Amino acid sequence: MTPGNNGGNTPSAPQGDDDPFGYLYEDGQAAGATPPGGGGGYGYPGPRSSYHHVRAVGDRRPAYGQAQAAQQTYGQQVPQQQPQQGGHGRPNPHYTAPEAQPGGAPVASPQYAPAGGGGGRGRGPNTKGLLIAAIAVVAVVAIGIGAAMLFGGKDEDKGGDAQAGGKPSHATSVEPSEKPAKKPKEKTELPQTDAKALKLEGGTTTASDVPGAKSAGGVYVAGLDKPGARVTWTVNGIPKDGAYTLFVGYGVPGEAAETTLTVNGSQSERKVNMDNFARAEKGAWDKGWTKTYVYVELSKGTNTLTVSCEDGDRCNANLDQFWLKAGHVTG
């Protein structure tokens, strides 16, 4: 250990960590520190006797470097008060270091600089403001969508694809229904005929001397009043097998008659009832024109129907017309 390090009186040369600005401080001035270019070492006139200076009890002057640290706040640099110089290279004789002032250098308490404050530091993002702005944007978008749905739906109700002038757009089309409307069934007209057009056998003949017949020209079939007399109707165009009703137009002279019916070669057990339904007086042929019906079963296609006078029948009647209706009906 050298004398300069243990506080002895033997001076030693200044080391590299000597304060080059010692001439600015009172203790440096007391030690004879001079600006660069003086006669001694850098900042001092000559070798110093010790680098560990003893201070008196109660001396509050901080060492070099502490005064600068005390002037800094947490996170913020406090501008230092630069000493006023009287001239280049010479200290201002009126300058007094802060440590030498009454009360010593004030110790600044750490201060938290607000984010984004002055001093060249930027403020942090305002998250609260950003959140409020985002909520406002979402609200505006939601209101816009709701309005579009509300007013758009009304426009569609009024005809969404209508253009100016109330004309439908070119995209408007009418599609056919999946199932076409069923056409009403056309009523099938079954055959009908005048008696004079039938096959006449057994003494039957045509006549027209009794007025009131509905056949064309008032011509009817007479001569059915003796056994073996008959007329046969060959019917074509029966649409299907099933039940039908044979209607017969006839006239009687105020008294009932009854004949036999044969269908497709089979004699029916039921007689053709030719009663005096017109309530004509006896012998009044012109007042006895009426009609009767018989239920029959026919086959699809062609059928033969024969009305004849058989033994035991009462056959005093004239035949006017024949016609068919589907099903068993009465009129």
Image (tube, helix red, strand yellow):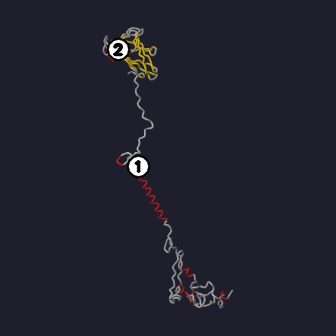
**Label for residue 153?**
1
Residue under circle 2?
220
- The answer to whether marks 1 and 2 mark residues whose Cβ atoms lie closer than 8 Å is no
Where residue 9 sits, quadrant-wise, is: bottom right
Vertical order, 267 against 138 (above or below): above
Inter-mark Cα distance, 1 to 2: 76 Å
Amino acid carrying label 2: it is Tyr
Q: Residues within 10 Å of mark 1 (few under 14, many from 20)?
A: few
Q: Secondary structure at mark 1?
A: helix
**Where is residue 134 shown, x and y percent of the image?**
47, 61
Residue 141 seen in this snapshot:
yes
Q: Quadrant of the N terminus?
A: bottom right
Residue 157 seen in this snapshot:
no
N-term-proximal mark, 1 vs 2: 1
Q: Secondary structure at mark 2?
A: strand
Front residue (pair 324, 106): 324
Front residue (pair 253, 264): 264
**Where is residue 210 shown, x and y percent of the image?**
31, 13
Q: Nearer the viewer, mark 1 or mark 2?
A: 2
**Where is residue 222 shown, x and y percent of the image?**
36, 11
Amino acid carrying label 1: it is Gly
Residue shown at the point (38%, 45%) measured from the top left: 168
Front residue (pair 234, 242): 234
Q: Is residue 248 left or right of residue 62?
A: left
Vertical order, 251 against 179 (above or below): above
Q: Quadrant of the C terminus?
A: top left
Residue shown at the point (68%, 87%) measured from the top left: 2
Where residue 35 sits, quadrant-wise, is: bottom right
Total numbered labels: 2
